[in-house]
Amino acid sequence: MTRTIHLSLDINGRRHELDVEPRVTLLDALREHLALTGTKKGCDQGQCGACTCHVDGSRVLSCLTLAAQVEGRQITTIEGIAAENGELHPVQAAFVEHDAFQCGYCTPGQIMSAVACIREGHAGSDDEIREYMSGNLCRCGAYNSIVAAVREAAEMA
Amino acid sequence: MTIMEPRKHGDASDGTVGGRQTRFEGNLKVTGGATYALEYPLEDLAYAILVQSTIPAGRVISVDAEKALAAPGVLMVLTPDDDMGLLVASDWGGNRPDNQPYYPLPRQVQYNGQSIAAVVAESREQAVEAARLICITYEKAPHVASFNDTAAGEGKVMDNLTAGWGDAEAALAAAPVQIEGEYSTPREYHVAMEPHGLTVKWDGDQITVWEPSQWSHGMARSYSEWFGIPYENVRLISPFIGGGFGSKGAALAHGAVAAFASRKLGRPVKLALTRPQNFTNYGGRAATRQRIKIGATEDGILQAIVHRGASETSTYADWPEQTGAATPILYRIENFSSQHRVVPVNAVTPGALRGPGKNPSAFGIESAMEELAYKLGMDPLELRLKNYADHDYQSGKPWSTRRLREALTEGAEAFGWSRRSHEPRSMRDGKTLIGWGIGCGTFPVLQAPSEAMIRILRNGRVEVVSGAIDMGQGTYTILAQTVAEVFGIPADQVEVHLGDSRLPGSAIAGGSMLAGSILGAVHKAATAARDELIGLALNDEKSPLRDTGANTLTFSGGRVAAPRDQGPSLTLSELMAALGRDEIEILRNTLPEGATAQEQHQAWTSMVKVQGPTMGEYSMHSWCAHFAEVRVDEDFGTVRVSRIVSAFDCGRLYNPRLVESQWRGGIIMGIGQALLEEGLVDQRNGRTVNSNMGDYLVPTNADVPHIEVISVGIPDYGASALGGKGVGEVGIVGVAPAIANAVFHATGKRVRDLPITLEKLI
């Protein structure tokens, strides 16, 4: 396959133009074509959650989403949630404070999931947070701290 | 007892050694700004994909790459027909055969999932498409799928792992109470969130490799030896690693393939293993089995332990997963016998995975101890305390520090162990059976020489520079804390540069040996740099501190001054400006004085200088005791871990906040080992069936309760310069038996083969 298509993607409030093959995923478009490498590839088959982004405010697995599917939609990645002046999003700040990560590789996906989890109203209790954050694997085992960080950020929201 | 609860707000002491400073690189990791190996933008990048064998044993007859080569965007196909002209590199011990060719894409197939060919294309998508078009013809040979295969045989005895003293068989036969059990663990995998892979680029005969690495110097050495280029020509860059757990300490075949392709194409190449390829391109923890016999008196005093264990290895290398590693040192034992075998099978050579050896070993002995406790009708906590080892019965040496008694008693107190009812199935909540269990763990203190550089800059900032790595254990943070303490400055005035083989040499981040080793070098270099600055400040005629008459200076609150408020105080930048110095740079290592350049190179790139736990006067280890509560559905046999309290003796903690995270991480991996993790092999073809994260189950957030961790350690200055013992490995050791013992207490069913899945309980 050599055919490319032209895409215009709205990512973190900015327009990005790119020419890619139609089979390129949103994840590979971000990482390989747009130098937005904050979104991570852990499995490339929808099992680990490391690639979690927001499309129109809802969490999606960018490894299972074709870039061509999200034209005209609002895409948010980990690079787009802190304030313009660099001040961390409350979920990001809570992750640092509670040491909710070690290696940091699942962290962008965890944070994108956490922001959506709170917005969905699924952060009402520790058990609910555990359940709705279970699509994001963390092999370093930061789960206790992730729950604490999400709970704190949810209380502040 | 110190229960470490997270504190909301820090104080000034957080920036010194032992403080609860938040993670130094935290902001980079939560904003997506931390750059991992496959995230370096390079011009003209090509993409490589591996093709793996689909038979377990035999020979590649031919590779038909015609269609692949004709596919769009394809630049190159590499097969066993390509002689890459590489030579075998040194092993961990620094041993290297002379001029032995190395074939990273071999003709001989030794296991299913072995890399046989590679495709390089303009894009990853094109490489993946072309890889599917490659057609390999094999000549098949008989295979051994696992050590349970009837063709596997008994394997061979590892003489170096045979241990014994007293007369174990006779003492066992004479013991009035005896138990015997066989315990087994399946193949387990690292499943680091970041898959293996690398980006590689040549400039003439200089190579730069961006690759996740637990040991930048050791891996750089492999590249230099494979390609026959000077060590100095290799630069391996690895400032962030997305988890390793033992899997990222050595350069692997796919690294050689990518580097060769890059050199041949004259272009940078990126090669990423797919998630399934991560299950066969390097080895996880070997499957193990062990038979344990314990003899005891009727009041529970151990008389003898006889242990016979075995683990799988590959057909081409011996890697023992030492099932008798924890067995001899947890308890007072006068008569002991242990032997370990390796059984070759058609699988990739296993590797080190968190708590290697100690982990399956503890599953055996700690399960067996509870079996003995129930046979005696004795509280398992009492049995353990009754047989407390006053010294190391294996080496005969005294412990350096051993607070396992405190771990057991303080852990029991925090858990509420005294409220336990002894009989199995005697604690329940409706249809849910509740069980409590204990598992102890240990891991040896390993020490290795390291080197570090300190630079005091004119702007008052202090840099610490080391080739050590941080895969989440906290190296950045504790190095900053150490330097901040020496100079009396806040940690954010320190810059930390890590993860580059061009930087000063370091111990591997493995075997829990990095923190103790590298902090020794950093502290030595920082103290020397401070002394250099003191000398200048007291003697240089331009120094405002020269006339104070002091013979030393204090470093506190960001200022340098004479003791007892004699004269002025200056910030580091004011002092450097007054001295007219742009930089003070000091390099120190912890090798003996006068070590040659050759000895230094050997120290940073091999394991020959690593000191074991009993090489000095003492026997030095970390210790822990885990207390687990499980809730088992009586009808369905589903097990949930509802509570864990773990108490640790890891000596002095350099940063309790980060240590607690690592302990919890080890415990959670132990929950996975106990209940979920199991590599499944198709006996017909030796294929790893569940080679992905949906079928090889690791713990999710919902699988994990709140875990309370307690430190009972005291500084151990024999174990390391700053008093710490290892933290990362020991956390997992003893978790699986604690859970298995709790499951027995809940259900009355003893599961001796991990994982404890529901069909074993109903």
Image (cartoon, grey):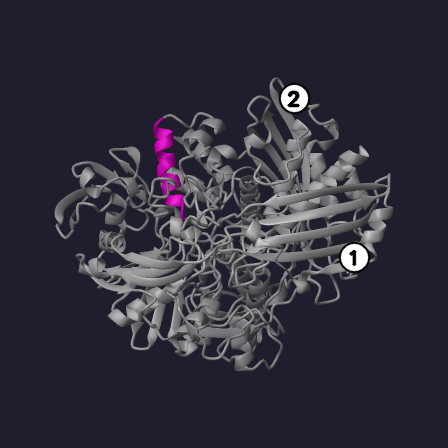
* Figure quadrant of residue B531: bottom right
**Residue at 61% over, 79% down:** B593
Could you tell me the amino acid type at mark 2? Arg
Where is residue B386 shown, x and y percent of the image? Answer: 82, 43
> Dot 2 lies on which element?
strand
- On the same chain, marks 2 and 1? The answer is yes
**Residue at 83% over, 56% down:** B167
Instruction: Determine the chain carrying the residue at label 2.
Output: B
**Residue marked by disc 1:** B393
Quarter of the figure with the C terminus of chain B: top right
Q: Main secondary structure of the magenta part?
A: helix
Where is residue B92 shown, x and y percent of the image? Answer: 54, 68
Where is residue A149 shown, x and y percent of the image? Answer: 46, 37
Where is residue B760 shown, x and y percent of the image? Answer: 59, 32
Crowdedness near tag 1: few (<14), some (14–19) or many (≥20) residues, C-alpha within 10 Å: many
Q: Nearer the viewer, residue B287 or B411?
A: B287
* Figure quadrant of residue A90: top left
Crowdedness near tag 2: few (<14), some (14–19) or many (≥20) residues, C-alpha within 10 Å: some
Residue B655 appears in the picture as rendered: no
Q: Is residue B37 above or below residue B259?
A: above
**Residue marked by disc 2:** B428
